[in-house]
Image: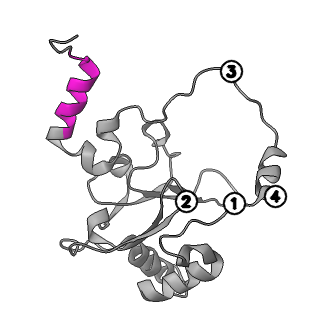
């Protein structure tokens, strides 16, 4: 995720990068941009950051997710983050106060209350929110064109899709082996 605060004049005053984003090609922030990075494994963008704030890995934080069928799921923290690392919401909340724009939540519970108020179906854990025909019509009304080419996966390398995998020697070896398309005896 790339968030930027832009003054009335270029370049950006600051950029806020969260782990896994921006894409490698987008890491070049304009000169003079102050870059803040939140992450766990020093992934893409960390080398360009002026400040690195250690975040919790997915196993070290609670979260609400929506799977590909639209089912809301809740995950609980399995372990506490090491050292000075914090959950993303806590880092963003602390930054908001330091910047004089304090956000209105001080705990996961109050954050979830605000989230549920804004997006009520997220409180219905393990349920699928029914779609609305009007949403499809609205989306179709935005235009665009249908391409006749085959579908292409947005995943370039399955073994290196996230910061933890990209920091793993084992996953790097899996990626190398997969890209070489080593034939087996049956092939």
**Element on which disc 3 rests:** loop
Residue for point 77% across, 30% down: 145
Q: Residues within 10 Å of mark 4 (few under 14, many from 20)?
A: few
Residue 160 location (% of width, % of height): 31, 39
Is there CB contact under 8 Å for labels 3 and 2?
no
Reading the image, the residue beneath label 1 is: 131
Q: Mark 2 or 4 closer to N-term?
A: 2
Region of the chain picked out in magenta, as a range: 171-182
Residue 120 vs residue 155: left or right? right
Quarter of image, res 161? top left
Q: CA distance from mark 3 to mark 2?
A: 27 Å
Label placed on residue 148: 3
Reading the image, the residue beneath label 2 is: 70
Residue 66 vs residue 11: left or right? left
Residue 106 location (% of width, % of height): 45, 89
Residue 171 location (% of width, % of height): 20, 39
Residue 151 vs residue 93: left or right? right
Q: Mark 3 or 4 closer to N-term?
A: 4
**Element on which disc 4 rests:** helix
Residue for point 57% across, 83% down: 114
């Amino acid at each position: 995720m790339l968030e930027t605060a832009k003054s009335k004049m270029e370049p950006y005053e600051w950029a806020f990068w969260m782990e896994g984003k921006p894409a490698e090609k987008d890491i070049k922030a304009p000169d003079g941009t102050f870059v803040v990075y939140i992450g766990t494994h020093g992934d893409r963008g960390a080398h360009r950051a002026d400040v690195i704030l250690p975040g919790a890995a997915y196993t070290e934080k609670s979260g609400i997710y929506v799977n590909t069928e639209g089912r809301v799921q809740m995950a609980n923290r399995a372990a506490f983050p090491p050292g000075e690392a914090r959950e993303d919401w806590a880092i963003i909340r602390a930054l908001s106060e330091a910047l004089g724009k304090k956000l209105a939540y001080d705990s996961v519970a109050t954050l979830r209350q605000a989230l549920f108020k804004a997006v009520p179906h997220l409180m219905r854990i393990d349920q699928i929110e029914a779609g609305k025909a009007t949403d499809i019509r609205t989306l179709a009304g935005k235009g665009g064109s249908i391409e006749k080419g085959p579908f292409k996966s947005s995943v370039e390398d399955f073994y290196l899709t996230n910061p933890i995998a990209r920091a793993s020697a084992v996953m790097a070896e899996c990626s190398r082996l997969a890209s070489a398309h080593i034939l087996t005896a049956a092939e």
